[in-house]
């Protein structure tokens, strides 16, 4: 197995999981901040996160290059992480 293959597998599994987890937390906090019921917000966003994970993972494996896959993965993870940090300061 080549280094590019291993890198793409890591991005498509662990990277997609990290992005999905951060996005789930960020969107849940935004919905709660907007007045949604916390249980319904977390449940709804968690159910949607399964589709998000599948989409992110398929996109990474379909990317033209491994570097491009990692770039977009990190570019999407950074705003989600910043949103979680901003919304957790209460």
Image (cartoon, rainbow, N blue to C red):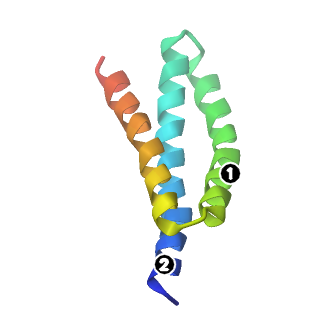
Q: Residue 42, position in %: x, y?
A: 58, 30
Q: Is residue 80 above or below residue 7?
A: above
| Residue at the image position 38 percent from the left and 41 percent from the top | 78
Q: Residue furthest left?
A: 89
The label on residue 4 is 2
> Which numbered disc, 1 or 2, marks the residue that appears first in the sequence?
2
Could you say where residue 76 lies in the image, as x and y percent from the top left? 47, 43
Tell me what residue is drawn at x 54 percent, y 55 percent: 16
Q: Which residue is mark 1?
A: 55
Classify mark 1: helix, strand or loop.
helix
State left or right for residue 2 relative to residue 88: right
Say which residue appears at 54% left-offset and 46% top-offset: 20
Decide: few, some or many residues near mark 1? Use Cα within 10 Å; few <14, some 14-19, many ≥20: few
Residue 26: x %, y % from top left = 47, 31
Residue that sits furthest to the top in the current view: 35
CB atoms of marks 1 and 2 within 8 Å: no
Res. 13 mark:
none
Residue 90 against residue 63 in the figure, above or below: above
Q: Say if 1 sits above or below 23 in the image.
A: below
Farthest residue toward the bottom? 1
Disc 2: CA contacts within 10 A as few (<14), some (14-19) or many (>=20): few
């Amino acid at each position: 197995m080549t280094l590019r293959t291993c890198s793409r597998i890591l991005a498509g599994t662990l990277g997609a999981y990290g992005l999905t987890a951060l996005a789930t937390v960020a969107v849940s906090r935004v919905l709660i901040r907007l007045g949604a019921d916390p249980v319904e917000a977390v449940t709804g966003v968690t159910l949607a996160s399964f589709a998000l994970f599948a989409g992110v993972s398929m996109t990474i494996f379909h990317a033209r290059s491994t570097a491009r896959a990692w770039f977009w993965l990190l570019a999407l993870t950074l705003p989600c992480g910043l949103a979680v940090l901003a919304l957790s300061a209460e």
